[in-house]
Image (cartoon, rainbow, N blue to C red):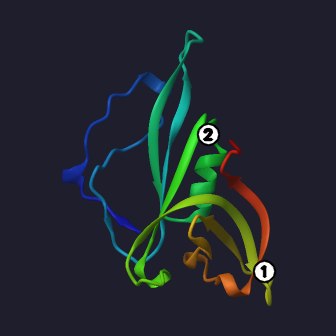
C-alpha cells in the first residue's frame, strides 16, 4: 500500500484524449511491508495522424497481479521490472531490491480454490503475501509475464 499526498502531485502534460488518466507523484510512502513492483520501459504511442513515437515511462504496482496486468495490457518494447522486497521477506531483515524475472499464477496445494500470484527474481521466488499464500505451500500455474530472451 502506498500513501500519496496531494501536495506532492505534479501536473503532467497531456496530449489530448490519447493520454490515460495518470496522476504523477514523485514521492510515495510505503505503508505496509508488502513487495512493490517498479516497471520501467518504452511504450509506443500512436498519434491521430498515424505517426508513432516512443515514450520511456514507469509504473508502480503493489500486487504481483497488478504488475502482470500492466505488463500484459501494454505493448512494451522494452520492460525491466524491479521488486522492492520488504524486510520481513528477506534473510537480512532489510529491504532489498531484486530484478523480477517472471510473474505467474499459483494456488494453495491443499486448497486449490485459494489462488494468487507469484514472482521469480534474481534473488529467489515468492508468492505475493497479499494473497495469503507462501512459496512453500503453492503450486505454480501459468506464466503471466517473463523477461524477454536476449
Estimate the x, y position of residue 146 in percent, counting from the top left: 68, 53
Question: Which numbered circle lies on residue 136?
Answer: none
Decide: few, some or many residues near mark 2? Use Cα within 10 Å; few <14, some 14-19, many ≥20: few
Q: Residue at x 65, y 82 (%)?
A: 133
* Quarter of the view holding residue 5: bottom left
Q: Which residue is mark 2?
A: 74
Of labels 2 and 1, earlier in sequence is 2
Q: Which residue is mark 1?
A: 113
Q: Secondary structure at mark 2?
A: loop
Relative to 39, is 1 on the left or the right? left
Relative to 91, is 104 on the left or the right? right
Relative to 33, is 73 on the left or the right? right
Residue found at the very far front of the displayed protein: 150
Estimate the x, y position of residue 26 in percent, counting from the top left: 28, 49
In depth, the one of 127 and 101 nearer the eye is 101
Q: Residue at x 31, y 34 (%)?
A: 12
Q: Secondary structure at mark 1?
A: loop
Q: Residue at x 56, y 12 (%)?
A: 51
Q: Residue at x 49, y 81 (%)?
A: 89
Estimate the x, y position of residue 35 in percent, counting from the top left: 48, 70
How far apart are labels 2 and 1 at the CA level?
29 Å
Amino acid at each position: 500500500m502506498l500513501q500519496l499526498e496531494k501536495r506532492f502531485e505534479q501536473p503532467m502534460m497531456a496530449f489530448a484524449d490519447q493520454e490515460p488518466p495518470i496522476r504523477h507523484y514523485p514521492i510515495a510512502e510505503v505503508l505496509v511491508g508488502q513487495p512493490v513492483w517498479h516497471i520501467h520501459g518504452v511504450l509506443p504511442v500512436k498519434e491521430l495522424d498515424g505517426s508513432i513515437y516512443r515514450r520511456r515511462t514507469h509504473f508502480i504496482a503493489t500486487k504481483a497481479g497488478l504488475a502482470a496486468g500492466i505488463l500484459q495490457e501494454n505493448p512494451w518494447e522494452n520492460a525491466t521490472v524491479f521488486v522492492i522486497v520488504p524486510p520481513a521477506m528477506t534473510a537480512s531483515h532489510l529491504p532489498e531490491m531484486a530484478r523480477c524475472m517472471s510473474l505467474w499464477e499459483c494456488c494453495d496445494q491443499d486448497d486449490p480454490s485459494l489462488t494468487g500470484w507469484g514472482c521469480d527474481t534474481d534473488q529467489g521466488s515468492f508468492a505475493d503475501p497479499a494473497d495469503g499464500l507462501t512459496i512453500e505451500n503453492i503450486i505454480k500455474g501459468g506464466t503471466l509475464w517473463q523477461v524477454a530472451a536476449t
